[in-house]
Image (cartoon, rainbow, N blue to C red):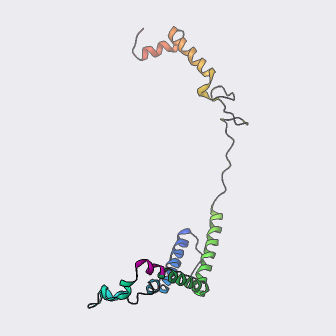
Amino acid sequence: MVLANPTISGEFSQILQRINNAAFMARAHLTLLNNYLPTNVTQPWSAAIPGESITTQTSLVSAPVREQRQDAVPTCISDAQRHRRDAASNQELKAPAQSIKSLADRLNAVEDEVCRPPAQWPPRTSRGGDGRPRCYYCQRLGHTARQCHRQYEDQQRQRRDEQSGNDPDAETNRVSYGTAV
């Protein structure tokens, strides 16, 4: 397998997937099913052979299931540790690990070049320097436009003017809607 320095993340993930598949297949060939079976069961496939039945196999009948599991656990642990030691000393697995590390370093370098720094936003105008809210209507600190007394007073004044007829726009609005006074 020829490894090249990828320029995009798609190439990196494709190469990484190939390496992972190769490592998985290598581990699968090292793992033997017979090593994980209990030690007192010599031929588990004999039940499928015509002429032999489960009852004729004394090792399966005599040993309870719990004892079989207890026998299998140390076997599994020692077998897994042996495979781990073999994989750590194997030079064939160290080469892909080095290439993965170099690919990851290259990807980090490319991402650093491509990514731009975070934007610097101007300070918010809706708050003062001390963090208090600023009113959009009267520009005073300490309240928002919803709580503004000046806006409330202006709205009340406008309603009074409309009701009393002092507002020249109020007459045209009534006529435009088709309601005559």
In the rendered view, does 57 fall on the left or right side of 8? left
Q: Is residue 118 above or below residue 72?
A: above
Pick the residue in front: 68 or 138.
68
Q: Is residue 95 above or below residue 128?
A: below
Pick the residue in front: 59 or 156.
59
Which image quarter: residue 116?
bottom right
Q: Main secondary structure of the magenta part?
A: helix
Residue 144 among those drawn in magenta = no
| Residue 85, image x, y percentages | 59, 84
- Magenta residues (range): 63-70
| Residue 82, image x, y percentages | 56, 85
Residue 67 among those drawn in magenta = yes
Q: Residue at x 58, y 73 (%)?
A: 6
Q: Residue at x 26, y 91 (%)?
A: 51
Pick the residue in front: 39 or 95.
39
Pick the residue in front: 47 or 143.
47
Q: Quadrant of the C terminus?
A: top left
Task: Name the residue furthest right.
Answer: 129
Task: Name the residue furthest bottom.
Answer: 51
Which image quarter: residue 146?
top right
The answer to whether residue 167 is visible is no
Q: Is residue 154 above or below residue 20?
A: above
The answer to whether residue 55 is visible is yes
| Residue 58, image x, y percentages | 36, 88
